[in-house]
Image (spheres, grey):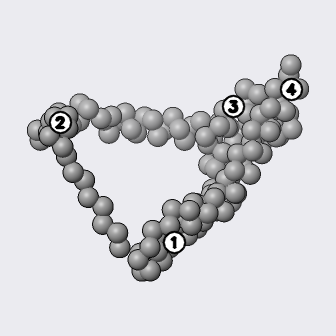
Amino acid sequence: MIKKTVTFSSDSPQVNLIKSLSSEELASLWISREERQIYQANFRSEILDVKRLLREKGPDSMTSDDIIRCVGIERFLSDTFCRRVINQRREYNEAVLNEIRRQAVLGVHDEVSIRRVSERLSEWYCERAHSIATRYCNMEEIET
């Protein structure tokens, strides 16, 4: 395995370490439990609203505004699709990590090979993104 080291020269910028923060200080820097619960409740509500909209209108009669509401939550709109996304992500992660492990055993580091594995398994995501983008463009063409 190739070891990589980091060295600092005498002209490196100064590094400042942040002191340990108390629980109260940490809480003030991040969202509170209540804020997170509100966000999650709003997110679940939005998913249910969009699912209802899809049932009522059907995919062919949705406007651009309706479709925009789906951006980022597509995988939550269908249990089957959600499972497929999770499985695709797992397969992708396992394949890339397996390639890295394989190279470690052989004592090589081949970024091109890792990139090829990544690109091959990214095709599904690229095709999905292209399909979604095409639908968005087609909706805009219809409304203009």
Residue tagged by mark 2? Answer: 11
Q: Quadrant of the C terminus?
A: top right
Indicate the secondary structure of the residue bearing disc 4. Answer: helix
Residue tagged by mark 1? Answer: 99
Q: Amino acid at mark 2?
A: Asp
Q: Residue 123 in the image: state x and y as whole percent.
A: 69, 57
- Closer to the chain start, of discs 2 and 1, is 2
Q: Is residue 125 visible?
A: yes
Mark 1 to mark 4 CA distance (whole Å)? 43 Å
Residue tagged by mark 3? Answer: 68
Q: Amino acid at mark 1?
A: Glu
Q: Amino acid at mark 4?
A: Glu
- Closer to the chain start, of discs 3 and 1, is 3
Q: Nearer the viewer, mark 3 or mark 2?
A: 2
Residue at the extreme front of the image, as rendered = 10
- Disc 2 crowd rating (10 Å Cα; few below 14, some 14-19, many 20+) is few
Residue tagged by mark 4? Answer: 141
Q: Nearer the viewer, mark 3 or mark 1?
A: 1
Up the image or down, 23 lies above or below 103; here it is above
Indicate the secondary structure of the residue bearing disc 2. Answer: loop
- Closer to the chain start, of discs 3 and 2, is 2
Q: Residue 91 in the image: state x and y as whole percent.
A: 58, 67
Mark 4 to mark 2 CA distance (whole Å)? 57 Å
Q: Residue 119 in the image: state x and y as whole percent.
A: 63, 58
- Disc 4 crowd rating (10 Å Cα; few below 14, some 14-19, many 20+) is few
